[in-house]
Each structure stands twice: as structure tokens, then as C-alpha cells.
């Protein structure tokens, strides 16, 4: 097979054709079956909703490679960055290739496009990820000379193994250990009147471990929150947020979020959990997670498992999650790749 003859196409997923959406959804579901064989395929209408709504501040480029008959997509690449004042040296980049088409030069062609885009945008570092269920990705990054800078795991909690007595104890201990705080919930969208304070609350996530990745703090703004809310509605995702306030001032102290989709009512995803440093060591993280999980389980008895991503170095959060019963499912690595090194690799190749 002459790989160079395969059609490589730049694609704007906000304005793709029905044929392109269908082919891309099939391609992504084939990759997902390799990475997560326990999960069902994503329906086409859901995929289109994900792809067609792009936040205003997110700059994104995508490419696909078609098979010889141009009826199926066999590879893709995506590059993206947030157009903000921070991290102007960084570009997120990823490549996916179906097993039958690997080690034939397709990834190299896509890599060159990513490097071109990075240089056009003045970005010197490409951030990439790999996982232990698809070892070809790590092997490719090692050949490029990328540096593995952060180790994480996707962890999963089987709710039939949840220690309910532990959760009840955390719910009881929460207000006892932290009587100066009040617990509350938002279901669905955030209240518009509090978006400024909620955006600032999200910035506590800058205290989460980043390994040795060359990253600056990322500032969440009200405009970004509104973008995320639009995407949440468009995607069909549901969200429940638990938060705590300091009673004396009314100021937020911490929050935690759970997401799920009606197409997969048995599975929830744990989103961000954060507590301001000055309010830590009062058991707020345990209280928040126990309260949010209890409420979601009560309202959605069909729920069977919860997944979350954690840095392996995030000892405080892992202590909570391991106590709840979360277990490792997939290991992920996050890599830095200097664009100059990519150019040297491509020249040598």
C-alpha cells in the first residue's frame, strides 16, 4: 500500500458534512474499542454535538486520513490551544491511527502538520498523551525524543463495592469538623449571578499537581465558564456540583463536580474537586465528595460506576479516592515535545 497516496484532509468539524461526521465517528469508535473495550460506541448525534461546539477562546485544527477507497477514516490528528495570556508556548497535540495502518509513515505526515501549525502560532512545545492500553503511542513518542513529565491514572469506582458506612461517616463528620461552613448544590448550569466567584473558585485547580510539565497557571474567566456552559447544553451532558461556603463571609471554600450523559446512565465522571488552601484540613474534600456522590446515587439509582483522572503524585486526593474504593483502570503519561526536536526528527527521517 502506498501510504503517501492516501488522501489527507484538513477538516473543520464545526461545518463538516454528514459523510465526514459519520466516518469520523466510526473511526473514533474503533479506537475506543481498542482503548476501552468495555464501553459501548458513541452514537453519531452525540459525537456531532461534541464536535460542532467549540469555545470562543479555543483555537483548534484537525486533519483526517482516508482509506484508499475514501470511504473510511484511518487516522487523525488534532492541535489546539487556548488563546489566553498564559501558556503561549504550548500546543496540545494528538494523533490516532488504526492498527492496520501503523508503522507506515502516516503519523509522521500528521506530525509535520502539527509542527507547521505550532510554528505558525509561535508555540515551541507540543503536549501529548499516551496510555498503557495502546502502547504504540508511547513507542512513537519515545522515537521522537519526547519527555514524559506527568504520570496519571484513570481510576474507577464500582458502586456495588462502595463502603456506604464510610460515606455516611464522612457526611456526619463534615458539619461536625467544619461547623463554620455550609453545604449547597447546583444541578445543571451555574447561577449567572455568581459566575465571577465560581470562575475564581475553578482557579483553585491550579494547585493540583502538574508533574514537571512546563505549564503556567491557567486563569478561568467568566467568559470561559459561559463557553463551557454552552458546550454542556449542546453535548447533552448533565452535571451536579456540590460546594461549601464559609458561613461568616458567604465566600466559597471548595467544590466538586460529577458529570453523566443520558446515553450512558450507568456511568458518571468525577470532574474537578478543589478546596482553597486556607480552608484545607477541615475534612471539606471528604464532605463534598460524599455529599455529591450520595445525591447523584439517590437521584439516579441506575448508576453503576464512577471514573476520574488523578495524577499519581496527588496524594491527598488519592487518599480520599482509594478510601472510597477507586481502583486503577488505565495508566496515562503526559509528554512534552519540543517543536525543534520534531523538526530534527522529521529531517532525519
Image (spheres, rainbow, N blue to C red):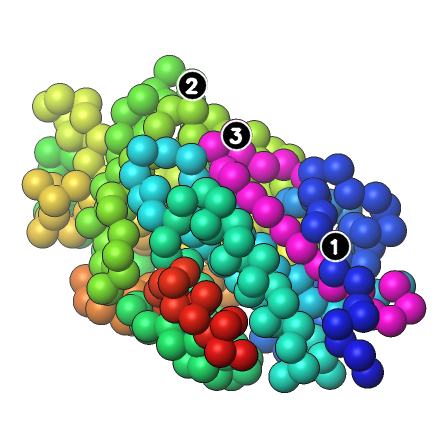
Left or right of residue 51: residue 325: left
Q: Earlier in the sequence, mark 1 or mark 2?
A: 1
Give the SS element for disc 3: loop
- The residue that appears at 80% across and 79% down in the rendered structure is 2
Left or right of residue 110: residue 143: left
The verdict on residue 66 being magenta is: yes
Left or right of residue 19: residue 79: left
The residue where tag 2 is placed is 192
Q: Earlier in the sequence, mark 3 or mark 2?
A: 3
Examine the image and state in which quarter residue 4 appears: bottom right
Local crowd at mark 2 within 10 Å, few (<14), some, or many (≥20)?
Answer: few
Give the image location of residue 102, x and y in percent.
66, 81
Q: Give the residues in magenta.
A: 52-70
- The residue that appears at 59% across and 71% down in the rendered structure is 108
The residue where tag 3 is placed is 56
* Placement of 298 over or under 150, stated as above or below: above
The residue where tag 1 is placed is 9
Separation of residues labelled 3 and 1 (CA atoms): 23 Å
Instruction: Mark 1 and mark 2 in contact? Answer it, CB < 8 Å.
Output: no
- The residue that appears at 20% across and 44% down in the rendered structure is 275
The verdict on residue 140 being magenta is: no
Amino acid at each position: 500500500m502506498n501510504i503517501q497516496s492516501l488522501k489527507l484532509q484538513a477538516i473543520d468539524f464545526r461545518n463538516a458534512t454528514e459523510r465526514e461526521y459519520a466516518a469520523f465517528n466510526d473511526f473514533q469508535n474503533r479506537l475506543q474499542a481498542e482503548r476501552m473495550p468495555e464501553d459501548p460506541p458513541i452514537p453519531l448525534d452525540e459525537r456531532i454535538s461534541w464536535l460542532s461546539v467549540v469555545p470562543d477562546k479555543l483555537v483548534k485544527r484537525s486533519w483526517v486520513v482516508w482509506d484508499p477507497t475514501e470511504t473510511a477514516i484511518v487516522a487523525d490528528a488534532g492541535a489546539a490551544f487556548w488563546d489566553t495570556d498564559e501558556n503561549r508556548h504550548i500546543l496540545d497535540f494528538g494523533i490516532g491511527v488504526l492498527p492496520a495502518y501503523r508503522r507506515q509513515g502516516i503519523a509522521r505526515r500528521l506530525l509535520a502538520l502539527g509542527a507547521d501549525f505550532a510554528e505558525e502560532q509561535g508555540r515551541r512545545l507540543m503536549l501529548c498523551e499516551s496510555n498503557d492500553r495502546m502502547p504504540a503511542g508511547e513507542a512513537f513518542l519515545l522515537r521522537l525524543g519526547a519527555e514524559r513529565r506527568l504520570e496519571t491514572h484513570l481510576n474507577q469506582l464500582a458502586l456495588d463495592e462502595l463502603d456506604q458506612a464510610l460515606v455516611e461517616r464522612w457526611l456526619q463528620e463534615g458539619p461536625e469538623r467544619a461547623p463554620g461552613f455550609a453545604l449547597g448544590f447546583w444541578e445543571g448550569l451555574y447561577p449567572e449571578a455568581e459566575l465571577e466567584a465560581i470562575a475564581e473558585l475553578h482557579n483553585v485547580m491550579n494547585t493540583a499537581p502538574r508533574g514537571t510539565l512546563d505549564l503556567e497557571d491557567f486563569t478561568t474567566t467568566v467568559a470561559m465558564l459561559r463557553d463551557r456552559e454552552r458546550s454542556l447544553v449542546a453535548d447533552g451532558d448533565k452535571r451536579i456540583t456540590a460546594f461549601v461556603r464559609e458561613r461568616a463571609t458567604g465566600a466559597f471554600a471548595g467544590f466538586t463536580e460529577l458529570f453523566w450523559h443520558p446515553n450512558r446512565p450507568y456511568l458518571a465522571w468525577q470532574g474537578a474537586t478543589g478546596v482553597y488552601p486556607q480552608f484545607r484540613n477541615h475534612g471539606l474534600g471528604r464532605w463534598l465528595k460524599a455529599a455529591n456522590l450520595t445525591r447523584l446515587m439517590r437521584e439516579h439509582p441506575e448508576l453503576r460506576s464512577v471514573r476520574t483522572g488523578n495524577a499519581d503524585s496527588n496524594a491527598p486526593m488519592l487518599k480520599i479516592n482509594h478510601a472510597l474504593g477507586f481502583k486503577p483502570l488505565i495508566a496515562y503519561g503526559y509528554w512534552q515535545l519540543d517543536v525543534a526536536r520534531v523538526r530534527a526528527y522529521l529531517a532525519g527521517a
